[in-house]
Amino acid sequence: MQKSSNSSKENSAACCQPSNSPADDSARIVIEGNTEVIAQMNMINLTEEDLQLIAAFRPVIETEIEQITSSFYESILHVDSLKQIVIEHTTVERLRQTLKNHLIEMFDGRIDPAFIEKRLKIAMVHRKIGLAPKWYMGSFQNLLGTLMRIIDDRKEVYPDSKKMAQAITKLLSFEQQLVLEAYEDQTRMLEQRAKSMMEYQAFHDELTGLPNRRKLHQALQEAIVSNSEQGTRFAVLVLDIDRFKMINDSLGHTYGDRFLQEVSDRIKKSAEGFDVTIARMGGDEFTLICQNVEGDHKFSTLADRVVKEIEIPYLLQGKDYYVSASIGVAVYPDHGCSEEQLLKNADAAMYEVKKNGKNGFQFFTNELDDQVLMRIELERDLRKAVKNDELVLYYQPQVQTGINQLIGVEALVRWNHPIKGILSPGVFIPIAEETGLIFEIGTWTLKEACKQMKKWHDAGGPLIPVSVNLSSRQFHQPNLVGYIREILVESGLEPQYLELEITESMMMDPELSTEILKELNEYGVKISLDDFGTGYSSLSYLKLLPIHKLKIDRSFISDITMNPSDQAIVATIISMAKHLNMNVIAEGIETQGQLDFLTENACKEIQGYYFSRPLPATEVEEAFFMPVRERFDHPL
């Protein structure tokens, strides 16, 4: 259907209305409802009369298609960087064939949704391989120039060649508009996607996908405002994984990351049915905000669910590993009305759980506030303790029963705080482990103990070993043997007089542990397994590792005179050590009844207050390095 081009209104009608004449089926505009595309055609005055002229030129296009297509890519392939882009992502031949098909279809003289969709797809192919709009538009100019030359060469054949040139120019202008729009849409989409990704990364933990600390603070602020307006309550739960450091140190960060991912999945599972925001604050610390509950007892229900879910064994490297969770709960507004106060108080409650045996939850109480302040002060002061020479070593004698002979001493660190006086390890060692100061303190302890024992040997004291606890961080450092050798050489103490106490948790990676302990054994250092029977590791390592002594934990000794289960466990440990050709020592002996049971079961090495409390070096010298054997008949 031919329309006059004298009026913009008439042109608009031509673009908007499909032709009803059968004679026009080969050349027509079939676009309904797409006002933007219609506006573009109106702007360049592309009519169905133009499309009829274009359709009439199709035979020439088919004849000259190779030349026409080559002209489009000519500019691209002349620029090395663009040529590389095209060849790297696809083949030029594939692009040529796609363009050939489209050009022939273009000269059908029909514009419909399929035409536009195909045009946009071709443009996006070039956009995705990295061809910038300016280069793509430059290729269009080359294409147009080639078509104009072909028309000029045939102007005698086509009397309407000038109109035909104008029609083809309009068609390519229309194509360029479509392509530019597609590029702009794609660019906007990519920018929006990049923006969304940046926003997601800014507010989410990369490892677990949970909200991060920043998002948690935002959610907590919103919860305070919302619950304040409604007069409702919500809870903040701070969760820390007990024994996570053991897994991370023993199995490495790869397995540590997998473990944390499973922990996050379990927390999410536990929170099903609750209105909860779960965030990973970093490391093994998670925080939950629980809202819209029927009563405060629901906070307990949630915390209890999480604790029980976390303590189910984790399968890592084909073995089961056990951890637990300590959770502190602070309720708005009872335990704070600000973000800082709620987090601080929930944190204080969580540390109280850890102090009382871990694996549980506790609500904040006002009594805990003072403890939090004390802990902050202690952490600050502890960072200066080694430099200020505030640490001291006490030594607890280890005795062989029957002959009452001193067979060794265990070095135990104390902190002589400038204001609070002597502090026991139970007060500051947990802080040292959490802050990373444990390596510095452990190194100081090891050096000081070796120097003191060498000093006693040189002064004519008994040639006995000194036993020193080795932290997990010390044990898993690179070149542990070199570290120990350097300390022994510096002090002058012979290796056989140093006994390192390690825990079962350090044996979680048997291959690594075996190699480390074999090196220490070959060097001459003795190995004692501390707190035996309290861990979750397999007993199989006992026959594989060069362990010289088992140390029965005091938790089995305290009720040994009354608890048949403890009696059975202790008797079994003593018997097993004997059959494995290991020495066994019991710690925490405080009564004659405990001593009698151990003696009856052939445990000959004893350590505890029944014989002596830990003593400063000078008191050890006075009490034990003089010929007063009868002293053992009168316990301190």
Image (cartoon, grey):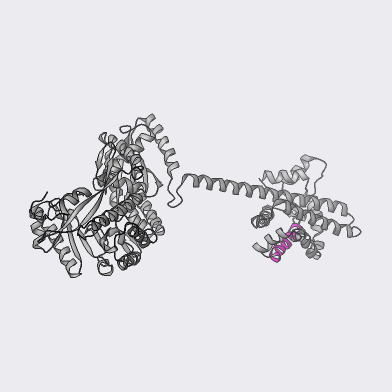
Main SS, magenta region, reads: helix
Q: Nearer the viewer, residue 412 or 186?
A: 412
> Residue at 24% of width from left, 53% of height from top?
411
* Residue 175 position in % (x across, y down): 73, 51
> Residue at 25% of width from left, 39% of height from top?
421
* Residue stretch in magenta: 92-107
Q: Residue furthest front?
A: 459
Q: Could you tell me how many numbered marks the image carries?
A: 0
Vertical comparison of 267 with 224: above or below = below
* Residue 321 position in % (x across, y down): 30, 59
Residue 136: name its quadrant.
bottom right
Q: Nearer the viewer, residue 37 or 76?
A: 76
Is residue 361 something one can see in this rendering?
Answer: no
* Residue 182 position in % (x across, y down): 66, 50
Q: Nearer the viewer, residue 363 or 417?
A: 417
Vertical comparison of 25 with 40: above or below = below
Q: Nearer the viewer, residue 419 or 40?
A: 419
* Residue 168 position in % (x across, y down): 80, 53
Q: Is residue 99 magenta?
A: yes
Residue 521: name its quadrant.
bottom left
Left/right placement of residue 531 relative to residue 290 reads left
Q: Is residue 282 magenta?
A: no
Is residue 39 something one can see in this rendering?
Answer: yes
Residue 69: name its quadrant.
bottom right
Left/right placement of residue 50 relative to residue 132 reads right
Q: Residue furthest right?
A: 156
